[in-house]
Amino acid sequence: MLKTFPKGGVHPAENKMAATAEIQSLPLPKQVVIPLAQHIGAPAQAVVKRGDVVKTGTLIAKAGGFVSANIHSSVSGKVKKIDNVLDSSGYKKPSVIIDVDGDEWEENIDRDPAVIKDLSKTPEEIKQKIMDGGIVGLGGATFPTHVKLSVPEGKTIDHIVINAVECEPYLTADHRVMLEKAHEIMIGTSLIMKATAVNKAIIGIENNKPDAIELLSKIAKEYQGIEIVALKVQYPQGGEKQLIKAVLDREVPSGGLPLDVGCVVQNVGTAIAVYEAVQKNKPLIERVVTVTGKSVKKPINLMVRIGTSANELIEAAGGLPEDTGKVVNGGPMMGKAVSDTDVPVTKGTSGILIFNQKESKRTKVYNCIRCARCTFVCPQGLEAFNLKNIAESNDWEKLENEHVMDCIECGSCSYTCPAGVPLLDYIRLGKSTVSQIIRSRKN
Amino acid sequence: MDDLTIVLLTLATLSGLGIILALILYFVAQKFNVVEDPRIDEVEELLPGANCGGCGYPGCRGFAEACVTTDNLDAFYCPVGGNDLMKTVANALGAEVSEKDPQVAVVKCQGSPEHRKEIREYDGPQSCAIAHSLFGGTTNCANGCLGLGECVEVCTFDAIHMNPETNLPEVVEDACTACGACIDACPRDIIELRNVGKKSRRIYVSCINTDKGAPAKKACDVACIGCGKCVKICPFDAITLENNLAYIDYEKCKLCRKCVTECPTNAIVELNFPPRKPKAEKPAEKKAPKTEDNAKKVIAADKTEESKPNTNQE
Amino acid sequence: MNKLNVSLSPHVKNKDSVPKIMYGVIIALIPALLVSVYFFGLDALRVQAIAIVSCILFEWLIQKFLIKGQNTIPDGSAALTGMLLAFNVPANLPWWIMVIGALVAIGVGKMSFGGLGKNPFNPALVGRVFMLISFPVQMTSWPKVSVLNFTGIDAATGATPLAIMKEGLANGEKVSDIMNSMPTSLVDMMTGQMGGSLGEISAIALLIGGIYMLWKKIITIHIPLSIFASIVLFTGIMNLINPGAYAGPAFHLLTGGVMLGAIFMATDMVTSPMSKKGMWIYGIGIGVITVAIRVWGAYPEGISFAILIMNGFVPLINNSMKPKLFGVVKEKK
């Protein structure tokens, strides 16, 4: 029996069309737009101004607080302006716009593809390099990695869990990375282990990627303390809490963090970014993005510089199909529908999904028939129908008592609802209102 | 037992039970009796009973409870009843109260489909708050009205309606009590409470777009582009410009209407003024002496005729 | 290019929908319908047709003229209610009673609460119980089964096995004697050759429908299983204690409306609990109340009342039987 998390979950059609497409580098764009807020936490503060000449890897914005991340130029060229530009949040956000001119890198970045296995750096050095490199979680949540690796006083951790589940349908970026950069993942994981003084790591991979499981299991023997665990395909296994439950059978307490059960979870992509930042001095300036969809001519996995317009990625995948109805930044279950195809790729962009007209429309909404399927599929044991009703009646206090803050917004409830009720829309609204109330109470 | 005995017995038992229970009830009521200021009931009688919360208290009774605790009612105001009601309440309580200017809600957006092109679609619940959390809107204006009518839903007085043609809410001035429910409901702060003004005449900037001029104008024909012309022409320093957006202070505005003619995008709206004299004449700023009851608001330099929010009640 | 559609995640949806569920249940009812036609002839079809048409008509009228909402007929719930209602009446029921029953089921049982999904009680059962109380004679004169009789109305009526049992026990006879004198054997009860309501007679046909619904994931096993288990356990114990005065579990399972009730009526999503724990309690409650009514009550059959009574408890069950939250138990330790 393959391991998985026990409660709830759904299994949407996988549609991993791009799984066999090797990662290609997208040619340099003419212009990049780098938003200053592309991670969770305080936006970064720009340190360049209009007319400045930057190289690839130059720091252009400094972390705006502890929970924040540095941002580096992904190209070399001239800063055109700093202006508000529409990004995938649906709003205009302050961004640095750089006109590309050649591809000159900062001197200290090692661009030699040879793998460096040396693990002699001290934990402090590793953490410092991760922080300087502006590494954030690449699974989509974009939480600054250096914050996650700073274990607070009084907490001990014994396991690093590497999230290679890629439970979102359609997306294949992590899958390809595992096949093409296996050693980098292992070294990155080892560096994370060293930085947190942990000697055990588990890489959880869903069973729909047998080639990746095989390859990683084979080379894992060369590295100490890394174990590969194959998992049953089940969404949302990529959720931190579900993944820890699946691989270690530990339950993160309600309202708690993985730290509370001795774990730190990192995405595979992040492990590679850590490797590159520590061993090669390369900040987070590019990432792998899957461009796919049923009508897309050429589903593809691309290595893309941060700030490239999604339009260019779509062009590389054969152009925007005629019947496009919706473009999503991220996976189909948790990604964000963009307002325009001209939005920049950010650190959190794991995929560009293109839905046709028919797929993009929501189904007709009927009355709730109390079938309770939303509660059966909720991995957190919440009653979605109930939360939705409470949120709709604006009873925020009751909503908080019903543990709305435990919702991980995986979307299993809306996915399952036969009445087509947009449960998560209301719950998410309720959750953000309640979290504001909680914040204002603390102050 | 014959039938009569049964009937009598039943009667006796039930009466006895009734008396005992009545006694219990009486003593319990005595024991748990809460002594309440009788004036609370009196004040509550006077209040409109709409429980709209516009006074800031939980319902009319909450307001009444708060009112009886003080001698000076200046900090209290029932937007529904207005000054007259507050005077009555003050008289009843022997307290003092000063008059407040009556207010009315105005919708500060003119982005009808004619002015603001729809370039994308929204698919989801009819909730402004949810749409606001998702994106800037179906047009290029990320500040303006989303048109999903949450303000209409929360209005207890049926004083705000969606106009299906403009897809914007319109305030029914006579019904609006300025309770502020729509203002809380709007996630984008489009609705503002402004003084009703003399003869209900008001001038305000009907836009909240903070974008720079060019993108603002591109998104919407009637956006405030932050050009500052109105600020310069205003003789009373009533207009301020912040974040590319002009704002008219209703306390300072003397309703001269100079800004309305000056605005290049017709973003400044005048309400309930008599029609202007033909353009050829010098714009006389004196208010017309006679009031025309059916006077409708006119946007200055009227090029676009019919597309404004806030028409008077029909 | 088309306008982009913007909405919140998730952007995919499984293929399930309310009409699919409703029509799934209707498909599951077809075997039992065929059996009823086989045993009761065209009468069964007539009653079915009247019930379905009048349920749809009443829902349409109420929706159009009273509620003024959108047309809800295509979701299939009205047709399903009509079908279940007809399953619960004798095949020779006069048409006007059927129409009144449909009006009560749809009008009182469903639409007065706001339509699909808002009714606390199973509408078909509301209609059925109303008819049973208002027209006790017509509702309990069961036509005799006769194989493929399409010639016309069969005037002969007979009692259900449950009624025979109840009467026999009241006269002081022993269970084994009653069983022997009964015209139907347990095998007949399985196939449907017994007196009873239109759709409840064949246990096998109903079970086939139930298995279809389980396979299609329209229902879960919890409610039917807990009803069956509690009936078996309850009657089994009583039968062991006094085999002369209490019939055995097989008899109780196969007669009356237990199969129909447990598989199709109690599992109605709208009126059943929403957590698995709650479903167990609900099912056990139905089983126990059914047996209690059958053994000690005035009516020979009790499952309709049992389901309605437990329907009333559903809000309470829902409130007290919440699913276990992820990560909450640890916190308490």
Image (cartoon, helix red, strand yellow):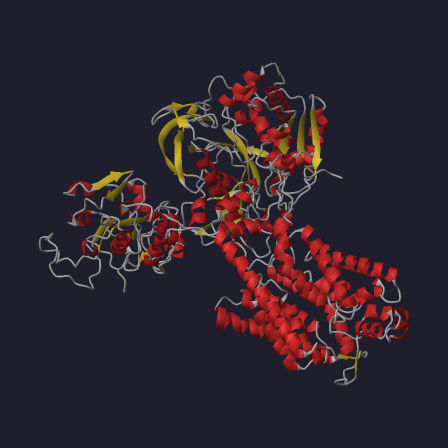
Identify which residue, A78 or C272, lies in the foreground: C272
Q: Quadrant of residue A208?
A: top right
- Judge from the rendering whether residue B220 lies leftward or rightward of residue C198; answer left or right: left
Q: Position of residue C46 (x, y in %)?
A: 68, 79
Q: Note whether residue A397 is visible.
A: yes
Q: Position of residue A126 (x, y in %)?
A: 56, 19
The N terminus of chain B is located in which quarter?
A: bottom right
Which residue shows up at 77% across the image and 67% down it? C296
Q: Is residue B192 above or below residue A87?
A: below
- Judge from the rendering whether residue B191 lies leftward or rightward of residue A211; answer left or right: left
Q: Position of residue A173 (x, y in %)?
A: 59, 36
Identify which residue, C159 or B160, lies in the foreground: C159
Which residue shows up at 24% across the image and 39% down it? B241
The C terminus of chain B is located in which quarter?
A: bottom left
- Judge from the rendering whether residue B253 lies leftward or rightward of residue A408; answer left or right: left
Q: Position of residue A269 (x, y in %)?
A: 58, 30
Which residue shows up at 54% across the image and 54% down it? A421
Q: Quadrant of residue A300?
A: top right
- Judge from the rendering whether residue B94 lies leftward or rightward of residue C1; answer left or right: left
The number of numbered badges drawn on the structure is 0
Q: Note whether residue C52 is visible.
A: no
Q: Is residue C264 above or below residue A221?
A: below
Identify which residue, A279 or B201, lies in the foreground: B201
